[in-house]
Image (cartoon, helix red, strand yellow):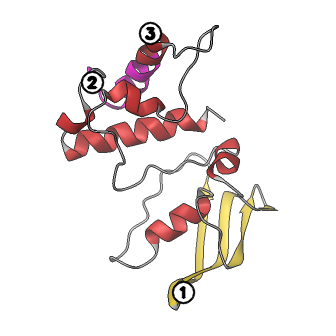
Amino acid sequence: MSILTARGIVKRFGGVVALNGAELALTAGRVVGLLGANGSGKSTLSAILAGEIAPDGGELLFDGKPVTHRSPRAARARGIVIAHQHPSLAPDLPVWENLFLGAERRGRLGLIDRRASRAVAADALARLAPGFDVERLAGDLSSAEQQLVEIARAMLRKHAC
């Protein structure tokens, strides 16, 4: 059974039809790649699944029940997070800070817990690329390394609702 299903998804931007009846079924424990030509609607469908934009038609089902993701936070609460194709990293900040931008870990006094953040970042990236230096500036990373940071951020955000 699918945990997330998109049926008949429609999205228009002005007069441009980005999606016209898109369908997708995602099953637990399976890795899925969304492939297609430029302009085929991959990013638009991903943004709808992640609650970043609303569809104009169609429906989303989560565990077989209709859902509406009114925000990325609502999608994250269901464990849905997208690692986008084009990373949006702050180049002048170290990797560990990029992982937590907008979702900073705070200590008892409300201050950012830098030590805990570094440790969590190092652990998350070690699962993807052992030995990854979380102190490196994001702007110094290769494209592949930036994508790893984007994936690690998605993994961490999934649990930070």
N-terminal of the pair, mark 3 or mark 1, is 1
Q: Mark 2 or mark 1: name the one nearer the start of the chain.
A: 1
Q: CA distance from mark 2 to mark 3?
A: 17 Å
Identify which residue is drawn at 62% across, 51% down: 72
Dominant secondary structure, magenta: helix
Report the magenta residues as a range. Answer: 120-132
Give yes or no for residue 131 being in the magenta stretch. Answer: yes
* x and y percentages locating residue 104 in the rendered image: 53, 26
Of labels 3 and 1, the one closer to you: 1
In the rendered image, residue 65, in percent from the top left (x then y), is placed at 82, 60
Q: Position of residue 152 (x, y in %)?
A: 42, 35
Residue located 60% across and 65% down the image: 53
Residue furthest to the bottom in view is 15
Residue pointed to by mark 3: 115
The quarter of the rendered structure image containing the C terminus is top right
Q: Quadrant of residue 26?
A: bottom right
Residue under numbered circle 2: 132
Is 30 left or right of 97, judged from the image as shown? right
Label 3 – label 1 distance at C-alpha: 47 Å
Q: Quadrant of the N terminus?
A: bottom right
Of badges 2 and 1, nearer the viewer stands 1
Q: Which residue is mark 1?
A: 14
